[in-house]
Image (spheres, rainbow, N blue to C red):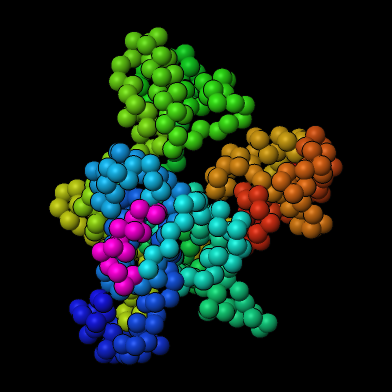
Amino acid sequence: MAQDGRYAKLLRRPSQKAFPDFSANLDESKEALSKPILVVGAGGLGCELLKDLALVGFTNIHVIDGDEVDVTNLNRQFLFRADDVGQPKSTVAAKFVMKRVPACKITSYCCWIQDMVEKDSNFYRQFSIIVLGLDSIKARRWMNSHLVGLVAYDERGDLIPSSVIPMLDGGTEGWKGSVRAFVPKVAACFECAIDMFPPAEKFQECTMKTNPRQPEHCIAWAKTMAWTEEWPFGKDVSIDTDKPEHMTWLFEKAKEHAAKFNIEGVTYKKTMGVVKNIIPAIASTNAMCAAATANEAFKFVTRSSLPLNNWMMFNSGTGAHTYTYEHERNPECPTCAGKPVSVTVDGEQTLETFINEFLREDSRLMFGSVLNIRHQQSSKSIYWPKFAKKRTAENMPKKMNELISDGDSLLVKDRDSMDQNSSGLELTVHFA
């Protein structure tokens, strides 16, 4: 095992750079490395993470990924082979790593991170650390919110350390990459730094429909306008970017639209890139960021060295440069600080309008969907279609000033489960 070899010296001797509670005892370190950890994502970065975590001595790894192996993955996701196409990524990756590192047990789940809470509300409590290898900001925000919601306090109001699950986030974008360490309720959370992400590029509807000038305009038109006009796979069926038939339809529609305006360059690959916001992946960037992330996981779990504080950036576009930065907690963060967000709305507008035209445009809602609105003063949900369908239907045409009073609080969640750990977005609503 790795901790019997090149890492043994780190674990056997005390260090000024270790956590104060670090015990220079190899057996205790082995026990810590045998506790379950979770890797989210088994793609380009996830494959590297699984390999590195197994090689540094973690022996009980769980991995979640809802995707299947595609032929386009084979050039950089090295745990997959041509025969694996169509198989769950998490399952294939787990088998490959366990074959190479027999001492490591990897449990795989072919689903999405939200699905696990539906099956077991305490699923995420079992892990000593959670490592993200994702390409989705929305999924990162959900996991961050959920882990913040798991933090508990004793009767004196003191934080219970065992309820705090650190989260490591590795990310790559071409030649650039980053590693971030989050300790819920102790240091800055993912949401504290959300403003650092650039907004998604949007095009005007008139440009996409009547005056497109670029292939991207035609693809965006097919995605945002043609789909909802024609509903090619049934009414209200959303685009699934992992379904080839959906992507093929968008490609053909965009190509047809481009031909009307003599625009060239609409390809299936470009369609995939625009719809899924794909940025070319560089294998060496994945390898470097995964190694740094696995190193941080080792430090957190064994306590043998203080971790990154708390953001490391890497750029290999013109050489190899790294920079570390401490991101401070945002005292107004709606997730970890629990601060309500004050909003002003028209009290005469209906609940349906409030949801469709106001809430779904709010970037603070992770999935752009509103699935539960709870009135804090009455402790009742005014919108909860999954579990309170009749009351929800009756409330939709009602005016906001009929449902709540000026200054009342609403807790808005984009989850449709009965799980209470996801913190949601609390709004203090004022009428214009």
User: Is residue 94 one of those drawn in magenta?
Assistant: yes
* Outermost residue to the left: 319
Left or right: 427, with 55 as reference point: right
Whether residue 420 is visible to the viewer of this picture, yes or no, is yes
- Compared to residue 17, the image places residue 49 above or below, namely above
Residue 117 x/y as whole percent: 58, 58
Left or right: 419, with 298 as reference point: right
Where residue 146 sits, quadrant-wise, is bottom right
- Compared to residue 384, the image places residue 329 above or below, namely below
- Compared to residue 51, the image places residue 71 above or below, namely above
Q: Nearer the viewer, residue 223 or 52?
A: 52
Q: Nearer the viewer, residue 346 or 96?
A: 96
Residue 81 x/y as whole percent: 27, 46
Residue at the location (61% across, 39% down)?
360
> What range is drawn magenta here?
90-104
Where residue 379 sits, quadrant-wise, is bottom right
